[in-house]
Structure formats: C-alpha cells, structure tokens
Image (cartoon, rainbow, N blue to C red):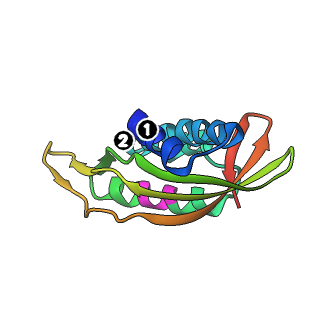
Amino acid sequence: MNWLSILLAMLGSLASSPQLHWVGVLGGLDKERAAAFSAGDPALLDQVYARESSGREADAAAIRAYARRGGRVTGAELILLSCRLDDSTPQRVRLVVVDRLDAARVVWADGSSRSLPQDLPTKHLITLVRTTDGWRIGD
C-alpha cells in the first residue's frame, strides 16, 4: 500500500484516530503480502495471515500457480480507498474496506512481463486477529 493510498483513505473516510491506526496496520500487512507475491514465496504470507486463514490459502495457491508457470507477480499492492472500523475487541478487529489492486504485472522467468487486468474498487470485510507475532488477517 503506497503512501498516497493511505492519505486518500485517511481523507476519504474522515477516519478517527483508531481508524487511522488500522490503516497503518493494513498498510504494513499489504506490503508484506506484495513482497510474498513478488518473491514468489508463499511462506512469506506467515507475516500477513493468521494460521489456517482462508485468505492465506487463496494467496498461497495463486503464488504457487504462477510459480509453476515460471512467473511471479510484482506491484501487487492494494490502493486503499476507504477504511471504517466496524467492531473491535482487544483480540479481534473487523474493518470495512474498499480497495483496488494497483497496476500489477506478471514477470516470467525469461524476463518478459505482462500487465494483469485492471482492478475495480471492491468492498471487503477484513478481520484482524492479535497473534503472538502481531496483528494478522484472519477469518
């Protein structure tokens, strides 16, 4: 997640201080997720998702599918358009988020690349869970 998207999320949702905190947490998790795609390494998703998260399994499957064909995805950062705190406890936070994928590309083993289809803004309900390693995306 780039700084511009964070700023847009802050301004666009007129978020209170707790919501701004969660924008930062999501930004950090998104950076780690993009790094996992760029490296073609699903093990890096442990820095993003809680164990056995359905999101982790979906992302890991996508990374492995590209790797099997000799590719990896670069630029897979999300542009956060809005973020609203829906519910929270000390161990779990639920956020309503609208985001879209930035201009991602597939880079193939021979050095060639191609753009992935343009993403549209999508609304998500994201649950963050507190783990011994910090906040992670959970179910």
Q: Residue at x 61, y 45 (%)?
A: 15
Task: Give the labeled residue for mark 2.
Answer: 38
The image shows residue 73 at horizontal and vertical percentages of: 32, 49
Which numbered marker is on residue 13? none
What's under tag 1, amino acid-wise? Ala
Q: Which residues are drawn in magenta?
A: 59-63
Neighbour tally class for label 2: few under 14, some 14-19, many 20 plus, Cα within 10 Å: many
The image shows residue 20 at horizontal and vertical percentages of: 62, 38
Which residue is nearer to you in this view: 107 or 110?
A: 107
The residue tagged with tag 2: helix, strand or loop? helix
Circles 2, 1 touching at the beta carbon (< 8 Å) = yes
Magenta stretch encompasses residue 119: no
Occupied quadrant, residue 97: bottom right
The residue tagged with tag 1: helix, strand or loop? helix
What's under tag 2, amino acid-wise? Ser
Q: Residue at x 49, y 49 (%)?
A: 12
Occupied quadrant, residue 110: top left
Which quadrant is the C terminus positioned in?
Answer: bottom right
Neighbour tally class for label 1: few under 14, some 14-19, many 20 plus, Cα within 10 Å: many
Q: Residue at x 32, y 44 (%)?
A: 75
Q: CA distance from mark 2 to mark 1?
A: 5 Å
Which residue is nearer to you in this view: 40 or 31?
A: 31
Q: On screen, 116 above or below 10?
A: below
Which quadrant is the N terminus positioned in?
Answer: top left
Q: Count the numbered circles shown.
A: 2
Task: Give the labeled residue for mark 1.
Answer: 35
